[in-house]
Amino acid sequence: MRISFAYVLTVENRGNQHHRLYIDGFNIQTDLLEPGQKDTIVIYPDKEGTFNYYDKRQYLSKLGQLKAVQVTPSDSFTGFLKYMI
C-alpha cells in the first residue's frame, strides 16, 4: 500500500468463532466479531515499513503482512528517468 493514502477495509467474520483483526504498527483493530458480523476500519499509513496483522483473541495469531511504500509521482522524475515512462 502507498503511504499518505487512506484505505477503508471492511472485515467480515466468515468463521464459526469470534475473531478480531489487529494491525501492528498502526495499533488498529476491529471490534471482536461474532460469526457473520462485519466491521470497517480506516488505515492511513504515514511511514514506510512492513506491518504484521493478526487474529487477536486470547492470543495473537499471525495472519500475514502489509507493506507500505513511498510512491513518487512520474512528473517528479528528472533526467533520463523522465523519458523512460
Image (cartoon, rainbow, N blue to C red):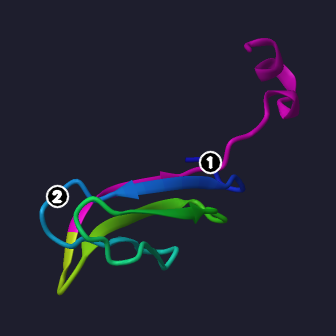
Q: Indicate yes or no whether the magenta region holds residue 35.
A: no
Amino acid type for the residue under numbered disc 2: Gly
Q: Residue at x 22, y 53 (%)?
A: 14
Residue 78: x percent and y percent? Answer: 87, 28
Residue segment shown in magenta: 62-85
SS label for mark 1: loop
| Residue at mark 1 | 2
User: Mark 2 and mark 1 in contact (Cβ < 8 Å)?
Assistant: no
Query: x and y percent of residue 69 in the render?
Result: 58, 50
Name the quadrant containing residue 72.
Answer: top right
Label drawn at residue 15:
2
Residue 83: quadrant of the picture:
top right
- Label 1 – label 2 distance at C-alpha: 30 Å
Label 1 crowd bin: few (<14), some (14–19), many (20+), radius 10 Å: some
Q: Is residue 12 above or below residue 52?
A: above
Residue in the picture at 69% in, 52% down: 5
Q: Is 73 left or right of 54, judged from the image as shown?
A: right
Q: Position of residue 22 (x, y in %)?
A: 37, 73
Q: Nearer the viewer, residue 56 or 51?
A: 56
Left or right placement of residue 56 versus residue 68 in this view: left
Foreground disc of the pair 1, 2: 2
Asked if residue 69 lies left or right of residue 19, the reply is: right
Inspect the image, locate mark 1, and give the three-letter code of the amino acid beneath it: Arg
